[in-house]
Amino acid sequence: MKLEHLDEAGQVCTQHPANADRILTFAAIGARAAGFNHDVASKLQGMMMALDELDELLERAGTTELRRAAETARGALDEAHALLSASRALTRTSTRTTAQLRDIVTVACERAGVSARGDAPQGQVAVTPLLAQALGLAIEALAGTGSDRVVEVRASREGDRATLVFASPVAPTTTLGDALALASFVIAHANGELRCGRDHRLHVRLPLVG
């Protein structure tokens, strides 16, 4: 893996260099993700069984306050399970599915905590769960810091390929190079390409299916 990405001219970008030490540190942590997810899943299953037993006991003799506390615990457990399911999906890098491009952009922006304005990309792409994650990393860094972060999205189609241009009204974070190197690697595996442009812009091209 080359820790780099290309600019608009197709040359290695020197404006946003990646920090190899930082990326490899996160890679070392991520290498344990599958095992960690398995361990957490076992603990959540145990908690779920315990709550089921508690529900039966509360049905026979339980106060309103205890039932309310159990419902709160059940809700928190369901949210934790949803987070774990999303994390486990990221480790299944060989699983490809067909998804709407607009849904991928929506999920990427949600994970980045960034609002998207502009075109709703049309068409379907064959992807792994990592694509939205990688795109979200790039969008998050591109959108800079602060509250109410936003990116403008422009979408177009040329034959069997879609082009997305993300633009930020503010300066990106200092980790943009790391995010673009990772995103470029993942997008290339989806037979697409990522390039950075002037004026805080990000160009992504992906092949469409169907």
Image (cartoon, helix red, strand yellow):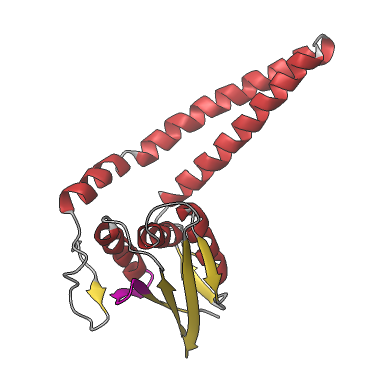
- Image coordinates of residue 132 in percent, x first then y, are 45, 60
Is 91 placed above or below 194 here? Answer: above
Residue lying furthest bottom in this view? 159
> Foreground: 33 or 145?
145
Residues 89 and 10: in front is 10
**Residue 102 x/y as whole percent:** 56, 70
Q: Is residue 162 above or below residue 168?
A: below
Q: Position of residue 136 (x, y in %)?
A: 42, 59
Asked whether the viewer can see residue 24, the reply is yes
The quadrant of the picture occupied by the N terminus is: bottom left
Picture quadrant of residue 57: top right
Looking at the image, which residue is at 41% across and 68% down? 169
Of residues 40 and 110, which is closer to you in this image?
Answer: 110
Residue 145 position, x and y percent, is 38, 53
- Residue 197 within the magenta-colored segment of the rendering: yes
State yes or no: residue 86 in magenta.
Answer: no
Question: Quarter of the image holding residue 142?
Answer: bottom left
Tell me which residue sits at (23%, 81%) in the image. 10
Chain part drawn in magenta? 190-202
- Residue at 46% x, 45% y: name it: 87
Query: How many numbered circles does the render carry?
Result: 0
Compared across the picture, whether 103 is left or right of 19 comes to right
Place residue 166 in its image quadrant.
bottom left
Quadrant in which the C terminus is drawn:
bottom right
Residue at 52% of width from left, 41% of height from top?
83
